[in-house]
Image (tube, helix red, strand yellow):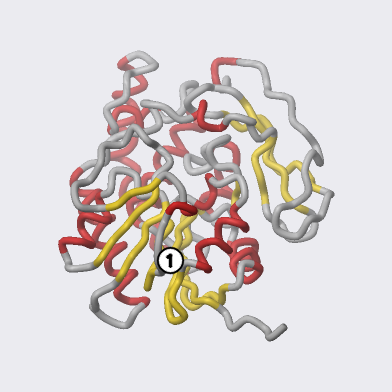
């Protein structure tokens, strides 16, 4: 079936960089012809032979050009409420109950999590590279972690790590900003999950090239340990991400235009006729029970569509 409008494949750079995690030079292509759903360019995904960390190839020298209005869609109020509730709950579970947290959110987006955390009495700050985002009154948001002052009980990093050009360095910087008994909570798509393995290049959460890196639990755990953390707890799904991933990924495998349903739900300009849009909605309704059952099953298997990992600073060896 046709993909991405038949555009030419971007040239892949095999072994162009050493692995940022283990410095191994040998990487093997594991996926070819992966479509960027926004620009319709194509990329490859290469995995390190040594540690398994995967990256998008080629990695654009100006990744900011791949972000824009179509990338920043609005979230439906029900999924927005549930997402905020879950993230607050994860923070509370990590700290063993409700307390006055001092929280830094790396990549805070529209600031919804920070506003909810502040409403609960927490002290909050954030970073966000998208300088076009409107300011949030009373909340300090900087464009870089280097500009953040002080230390924090908790740093959250919701679906940000995979976007960073040097995730290991970023994790080490986050560790330096935590209190001794603090915690880092992050989430990433699970490239080792059942959903990713079934849909491969059609997987909705692949999102090349904005996702510069692709983590499974093994590679994520190793990177956290290399950055000076110890993993405390792992959750294997985010309900709305996993549910929608099953549906949109299946549609991506069937339709010529990627992410038709996502565009419609987030208010993006239509890139196709009404037929694929109507088909996408009808398919979503029909597939919802199966998608829910698959989400439950893969969560129990610990092979869901997303990973949430809570980690603490590890004790550093004496010099």
Q: Position of residue 309 (x, y in %)?
A: 47, 67
At a point 50% along the width and 63% down the height, the residue shown is 174
At a point 34% along the width and 32% down the height, the residue shown is 132
Which of the pair 51/171 is nearer the observer? 171
At a point 26% along the width and 56% down the height, the residue shown is 114
Could you tell me if residue 166 is visible in this image?
yes
Q: Residue furthest right?
A: 26
> In which quadrant of the rendered view does residue 238 lie?
bottom left
Q: Position of residue 24 (x, y in %)?
A: 81, 55
Which of the pair 137/89 is nearer the observer? 137
Q: Is residue 244 left or right of residue 99?
A: right
> In which quadrant of the rendered view does residue 76 lie?
top left
Could you tell me if residue 294 is visible in this image?
no
Q: Is residue 242 left or right of residue 311?
A: left
Quadrant including the N terminus = top right
Q: Position of residue 273 (x, y in %)?
A: 35, 13
Quadrant including the C terminus = bottom right
Q: Is residue 17 above or below residue 183?
A: above
Q: Is residue 66 left or right of residue 271?
A: right
Q: Position of residue 313 (x, y in %)?
A: 53, 76
> In terms of secondary structure, where does tag 1 sit?
strand
Q: Is residue 89 above or below residue 279?
A: below
Q: Residues within 10 Å of mark 1 (few under 14, many from 20)?
A: many
Which of the pair 139/26 is nearer the observer? 139
The residue pinned by badge 1 equals 185
At a point 42% along the width and 30% down the height, the residue shown is 259
Which of the pair 233/314 is nearer the observer? 314
């Amino acid at each position: 079936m046709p993909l991405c409008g038949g555009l030419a494949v971007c040239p892949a750079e095999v072994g162009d960089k050493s692995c940022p995690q283990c410095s191994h030079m040998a990487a093997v292509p594991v996926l070819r012809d992966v479509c960027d759903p926004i620009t319709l360019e194509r990329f490859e995904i290469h995995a390190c032979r040594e540690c398994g960390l995967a990256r998008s190839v080629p990695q654009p020298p100006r990744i900011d050009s791949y972000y824009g209005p179509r990338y920043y869609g609005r979230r439906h109020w029900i999924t927005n409420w549930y997402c905020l509730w879950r993230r607050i709950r994860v923070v509370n579970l990590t700290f063993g109950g409700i307390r006055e947290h001092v929280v830094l959110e790396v990549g805070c987006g529209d600031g919804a999590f920070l506003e909810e955390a502040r409403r609960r009495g927490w002290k909050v700050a954030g970073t966000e590279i998208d300088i076009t985002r409107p300011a949030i009154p009373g909340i300090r948001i900087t464009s870089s972690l280097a500009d953040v002052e002080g230390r924090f009980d908790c740093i959250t990093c919701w679906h940000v790590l995979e976007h960073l050009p040097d995730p290991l360095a970023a994790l080490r910087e986050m560790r330096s900003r935590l209190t001794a008994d603090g915690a880092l909570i992050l989430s990433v798509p699970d490239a080792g999950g059942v959903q990713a393995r079934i849909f491969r290049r059609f997987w909705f959460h692949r999102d090349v090239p904005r996702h510069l890196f692709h983590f499974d639990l093994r590679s994520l755990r190793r990177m956290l340990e290399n950055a000076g953390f110890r993993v405390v707890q792992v959750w294997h799904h985010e309900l709305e991400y996993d549910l929608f991933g099953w549906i949109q990924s299946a549609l991506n495998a069937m339709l010529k235009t990627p992410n038709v349903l996502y565009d419609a739900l987030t208010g993006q300009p239509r890139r196709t006729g009404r037929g694929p849009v109507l088909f996408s909605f009808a398919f979503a309704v029909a597939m919802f029970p199966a998608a829910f059952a698959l989400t439950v099953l893969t969560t129990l298997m610990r092979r869901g569509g997303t990973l949430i990992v809570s980690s603490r600073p590890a004790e550093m060896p004496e010099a």
